[in-house]
Each structure stands twice: as C-alpha cells, then as structure tokens.
Amino acid sequence: MTTIEPAGVAEVLAILGHGEPEPPVAQTAAVIARLDGGEVRQVRLAAGLSPQQAARQVMRALHQPRAISGVLASGEPSRPLWQRVAQQSAKPVVLVPAGARDQPPRIRRVLLPLDGTTGSASAIADTAERLARSGAELVVLHVFDARTVPKFWDQHAHAGQAWGQEFLARYCALPRARLELRSGAAAEHVVKVAGAEQADMIALAWSQRLEPGRALVVRRAVLDAGVPVMLVPMPAN
C-alpha cells in the first residue's frame, strides 16, 4: 500500500450533514486523529445536496494533502453518501453507526479480520502498525470455510497453536496481536467476535466493490456491528 505523506499536521475529516449533531462522528474522528498526533477538521455538507453532489464535496476534502482519512455516519439515510465515498477514496474511511457507544479516549481493542491472503494483509499493514504503536490490542480474526478448514481443526490443540503462530508471523507480526479462529460464514463471525471482544473498532481491508455478491463482510459489519468500521482500500490488481 502506498503511504500518503501529508504536508503539515495530519487531518482526520469529520463529515457532518447539514444540521447534523457532532457526536458520534466528531468523537470518533478525534480518537482516530490521536493515533497520528493529528487534528480533526469538520467538513459540514451544504444543505440540499444530492448524494452525488455531497460525495463530490467529501472527495474534494479527502484529496487535500493533509487529509489522511474521513469519518462518516453509516446509518440508512447516509448510505448513498458513504457508499460513494468509500468506493472512490484512496484513503481509509471510517463508518460510524448511529447507535455507537461513546468512544474511549483512545482505541483499546480492534478487531482485524484477515482472510489469509497477502493482498489484504499488505493493504492493512500500515493501519495495523499505527494501532499497535498506539497501544491498541489487535484481535486478528481468521474464518475458515468448508474449502479452507485445515486438518488440525479436529485434532490436537498443539497443531492449531503452531498453525496460529505461523499465521500471525506471516500476516500480522505485531506486538499485542492475538489470533481468534472460527469456521463458517465470515460475515456472521465478524459481528459476533467484535461484540464478544468488546472491540472499539473493526478494521477491514476491502476491494471497494459493492456489486451484488461482493463485500458481504463489509456490508454485515457496517449494518450490524454497532462500532465504527474502518475500511482500508486495497490496491487495484
């Protein structure tokens, strides 16, 4: 993933609709900004804009050199906007559900789903490293399906432990990272594990494609997780 070097103090953009109250979007933006010692800049959308016009306003702000990410509401009224922005932005976009709990002063625990490919691991590596440097615990989640479940799943626990250590060494060799393994539908487990672990955020690498049958994990996390979801774009192949 290409690192974007901002000129001056890094800015996390809090994207607010016309007349929309600041929390929880502004609160989440402040927590994200602390990861890099940056600051929050509010982008208030003009009244009466269509989703296309609002997305253009947001994208102009995200194209500024100092902007490193954008934070938007993910509720149903905001769906046409966030889908456009998330699919177009070369920078991470954080989606905040309306019912998100108050954010702590810093991010303590992040759920990091990884599918076991170098593409997704590479895309999210910079984000994971920033989170680890800030002291956040990384709960790495890998979900097997019927095609990928390994032989150790029904064997001695030692085999699974060795496999897990190799997985972390290959895809997320960072301090305070631990691995959780599940089998089944990834979209279902991401939401359940985020809740069970009391994660403050979910960070997902994604292809920026939302056509039917794709981005099932992203859709489910944004809809049901109840915590902010950071979408980190994967480079085009």
Image (tube, rainbow, N blue to C red):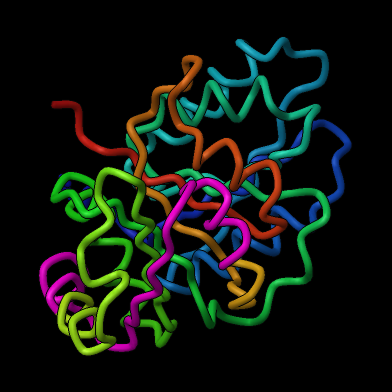
Quadrant in which residue 227 is drawn? bottom right
Q: Residue at x 77, y 37 (%)?
A: 75
Residue 237 is left or right of residue 74, and the answer is left
Q: Position of residue 179 (x, y in %)?
A: 34, 76
Quadrant in which residue 189 is drawn? bottom right
Q: Residue at x 45, y 32 (%)?
A: 215
Q: Residue at x 53, y 21 (%)?
A: 84
Look at the picture and state if 83 lies above or below 36.
Answer: above
Residue in the foreground of this view, choosing between 5 and 232: 232
Look at the picture and state if 48 lies above or below 115.
Answer: above
Residue in the foreground of this view, choosing between 65 and 192: 192
Residue 128 is left or right of residue 35, and the answer is left
Q: Residue reaching furthest front?
A: 155
Q: Residue at x 59, y 47 (%)?
A: 221
Look at the picture and state if 64 lies above or below 148.
Answer: above
Residue in the foreground of this view, choosing between 214 and 226: 214
Residue in the foreground of this view, choosing between 153 and 25: 153
Q: Position of residue 76 (x, y in %)?
A: 78, 30
Q: How many marks?
A: 0
Identify the magenta region: 166-193
Q: Position of residue 173 (x, y in %)?
A: 17, 77
**Is 150 included in the stretch rendered in magenta?**
no
Q: Position of residue 106 (x, y in %)?
A: 56, 80
**Is 182 included in the stretch rendered in magenta?**
yes
State which quarter of the image contains the C terminus.
top left
